[in-house]
Amino acid sequence: MVLKLYNTLTRKKETFRPLAKRRVSLYSCGPTVYHYAHIGNFRAFVFADTLRRTLEASGFRTKHVMNITDVGHLTDDAHDEGEDKLERQAEREGKTAHAIAEFYTRAFFKDLETIGIAKEKIKFPRATDHIKEQIAFIKKIEAKGYAYRTNDGIYFDTAKIRDYGKLARLDRKGLKSGARVAVNLEKRHPSDFALWKFSPAGAHRMQEWESPWGVGFPGWHIECSAMGKKFLGDQFDIHTGGMDLAPVHHVNEIAQTTALTGKPPARYWLHSNFVTMGDEKMSKSIGNIITLDGLAESGISARAYRYLLLSTHYRKPLTFTPSTAESALHTLKRLDDLYLEFPPTGGRISDTYHKKFLAALADDINTPKALAVLWGMIRDKKLKPQDKRATLLAFDQVLGLGFKTLKPALIPPQIQTLVFGREKARQAKNWVEADAYRIEARSLGYEIEDTPEGPKVKKV
């Protein structure tokens, strides 16, 4: 099967060819752990998980790395200005930056499990555990003539990278008067970015380290280059993240890695689109965020939200509304009920539908098309129920909706008595009494259905 992926770097679908045969190295930008991750953030994480699952279902072995940003992410990263988000949150909550990072990292891992992302499949390096690697990376860049010193830090000279901004199609001339206006007047170019920031004179930060340039902390972008290189090598196969990371973070990541190694860190760059609320993207800075716990409080499970994400192609914007969430919840409930009704043993995976399913995913991870194949399989009257169950479980190795963990609801003894009584009445051809048992069960919230395999009961 030929896998095609849309590469942001080239703006086209390309046939995926890994650096090593049947092995894929994958890096995903992870959370900045100063607050809870919101459902907009989880679109990028679920996409990366679906991509990894697709690769493995296609016969590849994967090595997946996702960074944990616990230092250096400033409130105004486009200009390398403002407060460190971890330090600011620590002051707000009256805790240390380390305590903030630990609390929200644990919350993030819990949310990953809730939404069906297996932590054991991913390596999670933390920025603060790799300060030595980041300093070494900067020293090598500096030795090659790509870095210079200003009053507040060590900066990367973007003019020395011939195609700086190619990933996001940045207009370097336009930057002189555009949105990324330099705040630090010592910067040589508006697009130059901090590799290392000095701690303010007379101030003591919660997180600061000695370096060849003075006490300070790393810039946001250098962590991904340093940790990606450490765990995946000078160049790896795929880099993923939200599309908001492309114009600044990923452009700068490419620049500094290219300066050191002569090539971009990844060959394929895949970016997921925004989750919007009305006309705005979901954002902590705007304050229009919803967490997975918040979704659960409104009656929408993380599984239902994952289904909603899968129902829209990752490169298209997704508008979140209560009605779209409810629709996903009801659709998944219907699928759950069907799965639980299928015979639990003796099924075989449909080769025809499995090939169609993988072919849909091979077309740039087209999950909406893959779901259409799923529903076509479910509706196929020629396919045995037990084969439908086996095929659905095969699909779920990629979808990650957790059908295998579902268990039939326990039927209360009172309802079981009604089912038993109804069967006796039916065998005696006492149809009026049989209907009475069914009506009573329905009044208690259960439906008794007659099937060739015997009576089935489900909660309504």
Image: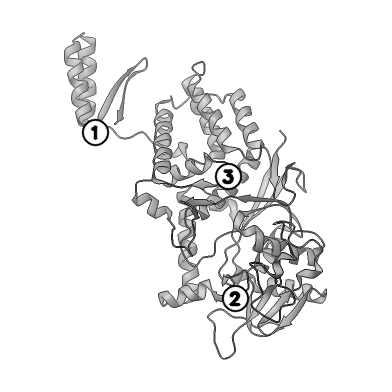
Foreground mark, 1 or 2, reads 2
Is 350 drawn above or below residue 328 in the view shown?
above
For badge 2, the amino acid type reads: Glu
In front here: 356 or 341?
Answer: 356
**In this picture, is 301 found above or below 176?**
above
Image quadrant occupied by the C terminus: top left
Marked residue nearer the N-terminal end (2 or 3): 2
How many labels, in total?
3
Which residue in the structure is indicated by mark 1? 412
Q: Which residue lies furthest to the top in this view?
A: 429
- Residue type pointed to by label 3: Lys
Q: Which of 363 and 277 is in front in this view?
A: 277
Name the quarter where the N terminus is drawn: top right
Q: What element carries label 2?
A: strand
* Residue 55 in the image, given as x and y percentages of width and height: 65, 42
Between the residue at mark 2 and the residue at mark 3, the CA separation in whole angstroms equals 31 Å
Residue that mark 3 sits on: 316
Q: Where is residue 386 in the image (x, y as percent from the top left)?
A: 48, 23
Q: Is mark 1 on a helix, strand or loop?
A: loop
* N-terminal label among 3 and 1: 3
Q: Nearer the viewer, mark 3 or mark 1?
A: 3
Residue 370 shown left or right of residue 334 in the figure? right
Instruction: Check disc 2 and report the residue beneath it.
Output: 81
